[in-house]
Image (tube, helix red, strand yellow):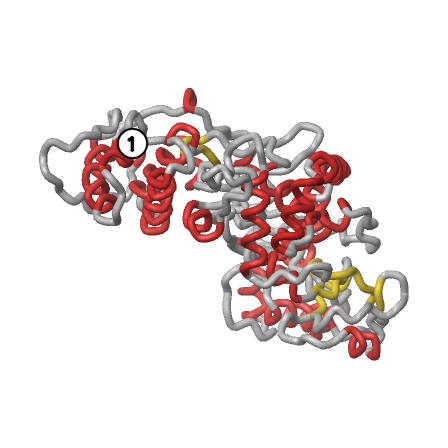
């Protein structure tokens, strides 16, 4: 469920903000979903069985993993022309069977799979450039996605009400994750999961992680929840309506229909939606509590206080002049922090406990705001009221690192050059902007980089 970098990682979502897709006028592919990623996948590439080509081992140059030997007479033999991949499968078979996977399940799962060069290409050739928060939200909470979300709440109202009553998770939040992850089921991914995970495990760049996911996928097949050819998803292993990765599926998926299978792949989204609610409940969802609310900051607000480490009740924030967007104190939803996703020039939010729960699904701030705001809009809430600093141009990870290096060189308090713009970098930017008589928004824009280069 895996970052254009506005945050990071995920639960049942897999590594790249490249999982899970959204509903627009034309639904986009699951491989370019709204999962924020540091290196988003280009929409131009699509995965299909017909698009798979076989190449020699030397052409792809995978990092070889040690192949264990097994007894002769192995039942399965992958139909691949890549001998290195075939050898790896033989060695992996022994490791898989040692975890309790039956030979029958393994052989059925691997029958006819190929070394999928399209999957490797997507894993290696992801764009360096990232979207700004407002660009992301324009897409994640588009009018069509809001409209489609409301339609889904009406269409599956009875099911969603039952799920909400059972798990205590607001139906609009479950629906919003569904929209973010697969365009409400329109784009669940059609890449064969065993083939994709085996390819990535063999390729070796993140071999240990993907081998773990592959073992989990085989255990799902062993349990009989899905047939091997029906186990499809994104190129990186996220599956079904709400894009669980195999290990998350094993831990949290539920059979809400009572048919004996935890089926997150079929046209019926019930098990997938209930599994998402079960996941959020497991991490402490508080029903009826907001993820966050948009707020107005007082003139001269000390932006250094906008940190997740500082949590206080809304009354304390109100004493500092922080009010709801309606100009009144925010109700007491418990301790909250101030979040400025675009610096002091953009929208400000007071975020609460449920923000952190959604974060367990995907750690990117942009994703959490996207889910939360989409849920609010589905429920009938208004758009974000503040304007965004749209004059800023996107910066890549490489450019953010250059900003940090230049700030450090000029003595503005940066200790780590990693491309991650946290509190330290934000404060350094503000200090530099103050020294130059610039607007102290703390934002790592291209305009700032140009000024630093002078």
Q: Residue 274, image x and y in percent?
A: 58, 46
In-image side of 444 versus 70 (left or right): right
Is residue 20 shown to the viewer in this render? no
- Seen from this angle, which residue lies furthest left? 72
Q: Quadrant of residue 20?
A: top right
Residue found at x 35% / y 33% = 195
How many marks overall? 1
**Label 1, on which residue?**
110
Is residue 322 shown to the viewer in this render? yes
Q: Quadrant of residue 217?
A: top left
Q: Quadrant of residue 125?
A: top left
- Helix, strand, or loop for circle 1? helix
Q: Residue 70, image x and y in percent?
A: 13, 40
Residue found at x 78% / y 79% = 316
Q: Nearer the viewer, residue 56 or 52?
A: 52
Residue 260 lies, with reference to residue 445, above or below; the image says: above
């Amino acid at each position: 469920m895996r970052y254009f970098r506005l945050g990071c990682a995920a639960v049942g979502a897999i590594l790249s903000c490249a999982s899970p897709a959204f509903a627009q006028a034309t639904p986009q592919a699951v491989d370019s979903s709204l999962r924020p990623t540091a290196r988003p996948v280009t929409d131009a590439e699509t995965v299909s069985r017909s698009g798979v080509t076989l190449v020699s081992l030397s052409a792809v140059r995978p990092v070889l993993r040690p192949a264990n030997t097994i007894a002769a007479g192995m039942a399965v033999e992958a139909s691949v022309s890549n001998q290195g991949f075939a050898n790896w499968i033989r060695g992996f078979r022994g490791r898989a069977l040692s975890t309790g996977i039956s030979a029958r399940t393994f052989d059925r799962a691997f029958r006819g799979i190929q070394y999928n060069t399209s999957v490797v290409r997507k894993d290696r050739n992801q764009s360096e450039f990232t979207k700004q928060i407002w660009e992301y939200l324009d897409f994640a909470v588009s009018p069509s996605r809001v409209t489609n979300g409301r339609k889904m709440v009406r269409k599956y109202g009875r099911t969603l009400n039952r799920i909400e009553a059972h798990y205590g998770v607001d139906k609009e939040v479950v629906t919003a994750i569904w929209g973010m992850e697969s365009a409400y089921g329109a784009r669940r991914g059609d890449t064969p999961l065993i083939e994709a995970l085996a390819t990535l495990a063999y390729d070796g760049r993140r071999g240990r992680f993907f081998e773990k996911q592959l073992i989990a996928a085989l255990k799902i097949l062993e349990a009989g929840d899905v047939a091997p050819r029906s186990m499809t998803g994104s190129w990186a292993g996220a599956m079904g309506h709400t894009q669980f990765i195999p290990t998350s599926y094993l831990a949290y998926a539920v059979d809400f229909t009572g048919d004996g299978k935890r089926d997150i792949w079929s046209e019926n989204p019930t098990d997938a939606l209930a599994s998402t609610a079960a996941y959020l409940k497991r991490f402490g969802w508080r029903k009826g509590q907001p993820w966050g609310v948009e707020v107005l900051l007082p003139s001269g607000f000390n932006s250094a206080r906008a940190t997740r480490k500082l949590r206080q009740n809304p009354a304390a924030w109100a004493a500092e002049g922080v009010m709801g967007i309606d100009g009144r104190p925010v109700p007491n939803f418990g301790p909250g922090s101030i979040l400025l996703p675009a610096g002091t020039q953009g929208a400000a939010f007071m975020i609460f406990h449920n923000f952190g729960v959604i974060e367990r699904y995907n750690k990117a701030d942009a994703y959490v705001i996207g889910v939360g705001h989409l849920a609010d809009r589905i429920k009938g809430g208004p758009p974000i009221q503040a304007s965004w600093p749209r004059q800023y141009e996107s910066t890549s990870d490489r450019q953010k690192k250059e900003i940090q290096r230049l700030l450090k060189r000029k003595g503005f308090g940066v200790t780590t050059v990693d491309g991650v713009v946290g509190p330290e970098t934000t404060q350094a930017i503000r200090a530099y902007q103050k020294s130059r008589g610039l607007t102290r928004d703390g934002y790592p824009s291209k305009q700032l980089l140009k000024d630093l280069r002078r």
